[in-house]
Image (spheres, grey):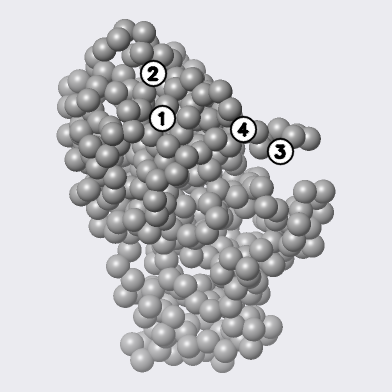
Amino acid sequence: MQQKAPDSVTFSPQPPGATAALVLADGTVFWGKGLGATGAAVGEVVFNTAMTGYQEVLTDPSYAGQIITFTFPHIGNVGANLEDIESTTPAVRGALFRADVTQPSNWRATRSLDAWMTSNGIVGIAGIDTRALTRRIREKGAPNGTIAHSPDGVFDLEDLRRKAADWPGLLGMDLAKDVTCGQTYNWDESLWRLGQGYGRQESPVHHVVAVDYGAKRNILRCLANSGCKVTVVPATTTAEEILAHKPDGVFLSNGPGDPEATGVYAVPAIQGVLNAGLPLFGICLGHQMLALALGGKTHKMDTGHRGANHPVKDLATGKVEITSQNHGFTVVEDSLPRDVAVSHRSLFDGTVEGLTVEGRPVFSVQYHPEASPGPQDSHYLFDRFVTLMAEKKSSGT
């Protein structure tokens, strides 16, 4: 029997055995089988096209405020472990899967994905028609939704719809402050190797201050692996505090939310670093806020880029890289000043994927060169950053 809300929204009937639902702000309901944590959570519903690395995706801080639709159907079959995480406390609001999550079949697994999601408070739904949902997002943009899991199958659909409709959305929302570190710390863990696990950087050559707007661990590992001592500082750290560490270079991390909202406090700090003349490398949210600090603008995309198969062209070399991406905002190319050049461009939609600044050791990319998950085509960017720091040192300026 269909349920009718007081405002004349008609909800789709609940199938037998359904223990979870995704309710969009317009009243559309996707029913399924609940897994992970019980309860409800509100967020922006997006999709990710990666075929591997679901645990890294679910622990990426850039997904704060979002519910992920996995387009690849087989999620969870290798279980979960203690190594493939990009943050200790996942910020994602929920996850949607096409197929039921099976018991793990992998020698590295320590528990099932279901158990891991439960322990981390992540609500999930299996059995969703992810193709239909993804098509909807592509055609109409990313909607607000409420994901709910109730083992008894009892739901107040109108209340769930109202929560989704009343949620303000990511535009204008500063989420970096919710996922950044609480205090400054040092990082020396390097990349993972089969049979060895993660290594340690014991002989660093350069000192990098990494500003944490929601940094993934593999970014810090890549910096350490490139010969850097890494000092991680909170998102609200000022330019004076950053420079007091006497770094050879400054890194601006990825993160969630609207760059203009985070930029209220981050842009002045970035401008202070630019004025100091230090090598600077930004990715994702760091890339967007660097553009703001240079005088550019950003805007929210309808669907964003999320996946591990995005082609990007290096305009200087003509080389095409397959990249890992996760962003819902982009830099407005026409807003950039004359001394800022577009260095990389998306071959999907032509949007800005990288910036360089004329006469300065400053560059950024929109995508994730550290991958995890995804291809490693862009690891060379960490070497470029190291080269800039070495050249700055040798010049004595």
Are there few (<14), some (14-19), or many (20+) residues within 10 Å of tag 1?
Answer: many
Residue situated in front as seen by the camera: 56 or 327? 56
Cβ atoms at labels 1 and 2 below 8 Å apart: yes
Q: What residue type is disc 2 on? A: Met
**What is the spatial separation of the Cα atoms under label 4 and label 1, in whole angstroms?**
16 Å
Read off the residue under disc 4: 200
**What is the spatial separation of the Cα atoms under label 2 and label 4, in whole angstroms?**
21 Å
Are there few (<14), some (14-19), or many (20+) residues within 10 Å of tag 2?
Answer: many
Read off the residue under disc 2: 389
Read off the residue under disc 1: 208
Q: Is residue 146 above or below residue 298?
A: below
Q: Secondary structure at mark 2?
A: helix
Question: Can the viewer see residue 327?
Answer: no
Res. 139 image quadrant:
bottom left
Are there few (<14), some (14-19), or many (20+) residues within 10 Å of tag 4?
Answer: some
Read off the residue under disc 3: 197
For image coordinates 29% across by 49% down, the residue present is 236
Ranked by sequence position, the earlier of labels 3 and 2 is 3
For image coordinates 17% across by 22% down, the residue present is 338
Q: What residue type is disc 3 on? A: Gly
